Image (cartoon, grey):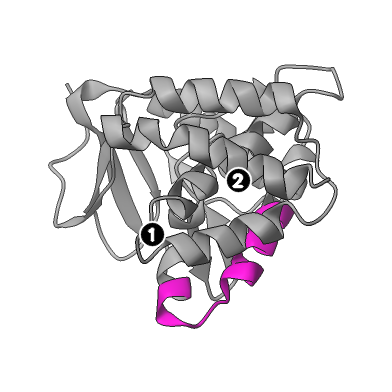
Amino acid sequence: MPTTPPPGKLLGSGRRADVYEIDEAWVLRREREGGGDAVAEGAVMEHLRGHGYPVPRVRPAGSRSDLVMERLSGPTMLQACLAGTLAPSEAGSVLARLLRDLHAVPAPRSADPAVSVLHLDLHPENVILTADGPRVIDWSDAEEGDPGLDWAATAVILAQAAVTGDALSAPAEAMLTALLAGPSPLTRPALTEALRRRGASPTMNRGEVELLGLAEELILSRRWRG
């Protein structure tokens, strides 16, 4: 069971976790049903922050399901796009830069320069636009591996949103196009693996899984034109 003090006001909820207010400087993110490994996640974030990557500060919480982290002020990248203060194409370019910068950080457990820290869930709702620039949150899926898989994971998330046919489809497609506009380590095997992981995720419903085929076609058309 969590050993942190009882949380304060609920600030937000995602697919797997809830975020609670602690005070003006800190928040508590609590994984539901005791899942996750907050200790490992916090260690990854501190490693990245030590190399200048834009992540929130963290502090020990005494629980594998609780992560205490710096309270950030600003909209998510998605909120900024919907409010018209950030163009979707610019959002896609920022995501690409964040991926490149992330993969330039040495992996803490591997001496292989081809191995990087991977976020594996980098999308517009996991980027907070603060006064000091974008900050990347939610490192619960982080692992070390091929950077191409990280690019593929982000591309799949954006493409899946782009083919839903709702109000987010056009912005998501613009983000995807900008994400893939420049050089990247994305490969077809990495895309295949990202699609497999997305389809196997317990957070996906049946309708979302059924969109993955269309998402793949969209990515192929943007990444390997002609």
How many numbered marks, from 0 up?
2
**Apparent side of residue 208 relative to residue 5 in the rendered image (left or right):** right
Q: Which residues are magenta?
A: 81-97
Instruction: Tell me the CA gap for discs 2 and 1.
Output: 36 Å
**Apparent side of residue 65 relative to residue 55 in the rendered image (left or right):** left
Q: Amino acid at mark 1?
A: Arg
Choose between 128 and 203: the one closer to the eye: 203
Q: Nearer the viewer, mark 2 or mark 1?
A: 2
Asked if residue 99 lies in the magenta stretch, the reply is no
Question: Residue 15 placed where, x, y %?
Answer: 28, 39
Q: Amino acid at mark 2?
A: Leu
Residue wearing tag 1: 71
Q: Is residue 95 above or below residue 117?
A: below
**Apparent side of residue 63 relative to residue 118 in the rendered image (left or right):** left
Residue wearing tag 2: 218
Asked if residue 84 lies in the magenta stretch, the reply is yes
Determine the residue positioned at 31% across, 24% down. Answer: 202
Question: Residue 133 placed where, x, y %?
Answer: 61, 69
Determine the residue positioned at 76% across, 30% down. Answer: 187
Quick one: SS at disc 2?
A: helix
Determine the residue positioned at 32% across, 31% down. Answer: 204
The answer to which of marks 2 and 1 sits earlier in the sequence is 1
**Magenta: main secondary structure:** helix
State whether residue 107 appears in this view: no
Q: Is residue 193 above or below residue 119?
A: above
Image quadrant where residue 34 sits: top left
Question: Residue 38 placed where, x, y %?
Answer: 39, 29
Q: Quadrant of the C terminus?
A: top right
Question: Residue 142 placed where, x, y %?
Answer: 54, 29
